[in-house]
Image (cartoon, helix red, strand yellow):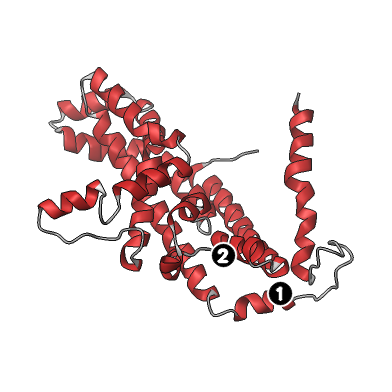
Amino acid sequence: MVLPSLIIVLIYSYGPMAGAVIAFKKFLPAKGIFHSPWIGWDNFQYMFLMPDTPQIIANTVTIAVMKIAFGLLVPLTSAILLNEVRQALFRRTFQTLIYLPHFLSWVILGGILIDILSPTSGIVNQALGWFGFKPIYFLGDNRWFQFTIVMSDIWKEFGFGTIVYLAALTGINPTLYEAAEVDGAGRWRQIWHVSLPGMTPIIILMAVLSLGNVLNAGFDQIFNLYSPQVYETGDIIDTFVYRLGIQQFQYGVATAVGLFKSVISFVLISLSYFLAYRLANYRIF
């Protein structure tokens, strides 16, 4: 039963990895991958000497780290508050509503955000105008673009994280809450001394596993929302590779940048699984 899936993975995931050799060649489409001239590390040297490279790496890490931090804090807070709601109908309805954006692609959500964040006709800027604020160009101002990217990603994904933490809360022994209540603990004390300690293993696990995404700032999202005027703060490694390879036809340099990212990501993912095993006793094998 596993064999068909294994064959698909080998063909579509491992087979294309042979193309990574382009990073060490001056790739000429007319000559193909294996007949293009070998240039060794020249593409990597060119990559690191490009003036935009440090800023692009910094943008990638900054956006990814903010997404990881808020992606842990917001769902955790949401799950704890939702767990305190006593009306089951309201709780299920709210949980469904915050989970729905997870199923929508960034092509759809990108169009929605462009409309609602428009500086001229967007509902957000109209609301700001009611309080006397000037319109903000959220998707065209370098001061606001990273904030907008992070907050919109949290809006899309925090419903999924909430479900994970709610599942952890259901695993806590109810007698612990009863004992805390007998000892005089209110709801906040019960959250602090019962809920959070009971969720600690899953919190540690989610935090550690997210380390592997430090260089993944979200190509789909940024590609659908950014523009040349916010390249300074919004351009990341994945969009940089797209422009180099697809738009500028610098296949060797684009492959070198992608391979550099893949190697660093592999190291971080390996480290995250090692730490997950040591800190949360989580293992995949």
Give the residue at x 66% y 63%: 245
Circle nearer the viewer, 2 or 1: 2
Q: Is residue 228 left or right of residue 152?
A: right
The one of 55 and 173 positioned closer to us in this rendering: 55
When asked about the image quadrant of residue 8, the answer is: top right
- Cα gap from disc 2 to disc 1, whole angstroms: 15 Å
Secondary element at image label 1:
helix
Q: Is residue 118 left or right of residue 50?
A: left
Relative vertical location of residue 164 with respect to residue 93 in this rendering, above or below = below
Local packing at callout 2 (Cα closer than 10 Å; few below 14, some 14-19, many 20+) is many
Identify the residue under disc 1.
43
Query: Which quadrant of the rendered structure holds the N terminus?
Result: top right
Give the residue at x 65% y 60%: 246
Percent coordinates x, y for residue 162 in the rendering: 36, 35
Q: Amino acid at mark 2?
A: Phe
Q: Amino acid at mark 1?
A: Asn
Percent coordinates x, y for residue 216 in the rendering: 52, 55
When asked about the image quadrant of residue 49, the answer is: bottom right
Identify the residue under disc 2.
240
Percent coordinates x, y for residue 138 in the rendering: 31, 58
